[in-house]
Amino acid sequence: MSVIRTSLFFILVLIGLKTFATTDEVLILKFDIAQEITPGAWQITKKAISKAESIKADFILIRINTYGGLVNSADSIRTRILNTSIPVIAFIDNNAASAGALIAIAADSIYMRKGASIGAATVVDQEGKVVPDKYQSYMRAIMRSTAQAHGKKPVIKNGDTLWVWHRDPDIAQAMVDPRIEIKGINDSGKVLTLTTAEAIAVGYCEGEAENIEEVLNQAGIKKYRLEEYRASFLDKIIGFLTHPLVQGILIMIIVGGIYFELQTPGVGFPLIAAATAAILYFSPLYLEGLAQHWEIILFIVGLILIALEIFLIPGFGVTGILGITLVIIGLTMAMVEKIPDEPIHLNFLTPVLKAFVTVVVSITLSLVLSIYLSSKIIGSRQFRLALQAEQKKTEGYVGVDVDVLSALVGKTGKSVSILRPAGKIEIDGNVYDAISESGFIDSGAAVKVVKTLAGQLYVVKI
């Protein structure tokens, strides 16, 4: 479809018309990509193009000003641009760097402000360091493929008609790889970045414009109605919550909250924090159609299995491992687009791998940090407010005596606090610390002492 649009564009130029010139009023849907390229930018693009198609817009105009961002989000954006049947005009309002260059090249025509630039698409990590060549190879391929998607144009030379690439694929991949030399353009051994004049000279820009009106005038669109798609407040919130860094923090809160709740049963606040983080994690992904019902169910089932392993099943085995696995799968797949109907390919596996790494790293960091904070806070005498209180015999408390505890084996009593699995029980008017061997026991339940071990009573519900 993109090749057909491009061919039509050059046929019109040859007969003396401007780009898609028309005397009738045309409808143009405009939206901005003036932010870091993240899942939020992809969601805005998807909604904007869908709106353009629903209102039957004649053109889509994208104002681009970005230093780049995530490759997988940029790839989704450029694919959506290439697949729409509506001609797309890109206006680079200052910067189209890195992932932004990929998005701009996907448009049918590009206009740039004076002093703007496009290029520098080398893949780097979060610290700005160049990543291994296998990642560069992938980026080179999608840059090259995007340029090729616009097909070839006729050029008359010495009376002969030659067909040359509308956008030279070698120039596109030179924006990624400094080893690719383009004679007269890039022979410095550095990653290619084009200024406005340079982009016009090599066919990567249709013209220089200072604003939207000049862009449309140069495109030959004189009479038009401009409708702008603006991100709503909800879109901005969703964009913020779906940022990989924020998602990683939410995962850390989920894991850390559960850990601290297990370490300090009955407090409640850690569990509330974990539940809130889980809602904030899954809600925007669900609203945007990323998280499916089965992914959320997997996460919940995983938590249930982990709870069963901790409270009901002695030791740590298959149930706990399966629970952890389901939690990781649920968190990971919720970040990823819908599984494609066609055979799984690299374009799908790459975001899956990135989501998996984000989840595993976040869980690991959360556990390490939780264990450290637990030793500093819960293990601190200053935090042990309950333990500093005097437990008087007049209130039913007794000291730990092995012989006394042994004599309690076989006796019955009742729980005076929730046992999950540790808590307190009362026997013959005395209060003892005890551990449940039969899982969660509510306060006020009848219990029986089954054994003592290391000065600790073990009970079951009767």
Image: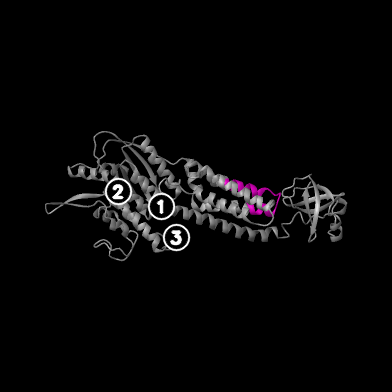
**How far separated are the C-alphas under marks 3 and 2?**
28 Å
Which secondary structure, mark 1?
loop
Question: Does the magenta portion include 275?
Answer: yes
The quadrant of the image that shows the N terminus is top left
Q: Nearer the viewer, mark 3 or mark 2?
A: 3
Name the N-terminal-most of marks 1 and 2.
Answer: 2
Circle 3 packing at 10 Å, graded few (<14), some (14-19), many (20+), is few
Residue toward you, 456 or 262: 456
Q: Where is mark 3, residue-wise?
A: 125
Determine the main secondary structure of the stretch shown in magenta. Answer: helix
* Residue 397 placement, left or right of 50: right
Question: Does the magenta portion include 351?
Answer: no
Q: Amino acid at mark 2?
A: Ile
Q: Nearer the viewer, mark 3 or mark 1?
A: 1
Residue toward you, 173 or 201: 173
Q: Where is mark 1, residue-wise?
A: 345
Residue in the picture at 68% in, 57% down: 315
Q: Where is mark 2, residue-wise?
A: 110
